[in-house]
Amino acid sequence: MKIKVDVGNNQRRADVYIAGALKISRAKAAKLCDVGSVTLDGIKISKNHRMNANDLLEISDDREVGLHQSEQDSTGVHISSDDVEVIKVPEDNDLYNANEEGILKIGILYEDDYIIVVDKPAGLLTHAKGDKSFECTLSDKIFEYTEGSLANGSGANRPGVVHRLDRGTCGVMVMAKTDTALKHLTEAFEKQEVSKEYEAIVYDNIVRDSGVITAKIERNKKNRLKMSAGDEGREAHTEFKVIERFGKFTYVSLVIKSGRTHQIRVHMNYIHHPVLGDMLYGKRKDKFNLMWPMLRSKKIGFLHPITSEKMEFTVAMPYEFKRILRILRQK
C-alpha cells in the first residue's frame, strides 16, 4: 500500500498521519512503524518521523499487526476513527444531538498551552487498554487534534490522560499538554483537590433526600471485569442528592471525593439503586433500549496547574439523558 502525503500534513508525525490516512488508532499506526512496516524511499521510519509534503510512504504486509482485525471489549463495541469527530463547543455549550448520523462528538471546552478540557461522548474509551488494543480512543483523537501536543508522562497508550471516565460515561474531563501540567494535575487528583460532580438516573425510589456512601471498593474476586463494595479494599466516598423522583426511577446528583474504578456505579448498586442502563452492575434489560448507563460527568473544578487560576467547567446534558427524563416526566 502506498500513500502520498499532501501539503496539509507537512511536518506531521508519521504515526498521526498514518492513523488519519488509514482510519486506525494512533497506537496501531505507531505499531506499524515499530515493526518496520512503514518505509520512505526504501528506508524504515519511526513513528516520530516528521512527514514532508509529497513524501510517498509504503506500508508493507499490514497483517503483521492485524490492521483489519476488529478487536472488541466486553461490550461488543468497536469504535473506528471515522466514528469520532472533534469540534469546538458552541457558545450555548450544547453539542447534542451528539450521536446524530452515528458520529460521536468530542467537544473542546477550553484549551491553552498546558491543558485541554473536553466533553467525552458515551461509547468512547478514554485511552487504549494495551499494546494490542487498536480501537480509536479519546486520547487518540485529542492527540491528532493537537498534532501530538500532549503530555507523554502517562505512557505511550494514554498521552495527556490525567484521569478517566468509563466507556459508557459521558462528560467533562481535563487533559494535560505538558508533563509539568500532568504532574500537577495528577497530584491534585490524588490529594482530592479536584471537585467532580456527576448526574445519574438510577433504579427505584430513593427515600432519603441525600446521603453519603463510604463502602470500600476492590476488584471482584469472581469476576475481574467488576468491582465490589464492602468492608475491604480502597477507601471511597460518594455523596448523593435527589433531584427528582419518578416512582420506579430517581434522578440524582453525585459528588465523589475519591476516584475509584466504577466508583459511582458500584456504590449505587451497593445501596440497591443501580444506574439505569448499566449492564455490568444493574439489570440486564431495560425498557428504554439504552446502549450506555445514564451517568454523566457534569462539572469539574480545579486550580490551573501552571497559573493556579481557579477553573470550573460545566457541560450540557446529552440528548439521550434528556430523552429519558422527558419520558419519565410524561408518566
Image: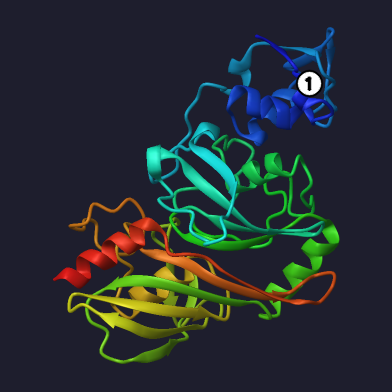
Which is nearer the eye, 213 or 115? 115
Query: Residue visible at 17% across and 57% down?
Result: 287
Which is nearer the eye, 144 or 204? 144
Query: Residue visible at 81% across and 14% down?
Result: 55
Residue 148 picture quarter: top right
Colour scheme in the image?
A: rainbow
Amino acid identity at mark 1 = Val
- The N terminus sits in image quarter: top right
Residue 117 to residue 197: above or below: above
Left or right of 90, for residue 186? right
Which is nearer the eye, 221 or 73? 73
Relative image position of residue 62 (x, y in whole percent): 62, 16
Relative image position of residue 82 (x, y in whole percent): 52, 32
Relative image position of residue 35 (x, y in whole percent): 73, 22
Which is nearer the eye, 271 or 97? 97
Answer yes or no: is residue 310 visible: yes
Residue 293 to residue 203: above or below: above
Relative image position of residue 209 (x, y in whole percent): 33, 91
Residue marked by disc 1: 7
Left or right of 107, for residue 45? right
Query: Residue visible at 68% across and 49% down?
Result: 158
Residue 234 picture quarter: bottom right
Query: Residue visible at 83% across and 57% down?
Result: 179
Callout 1 secondary element: helix
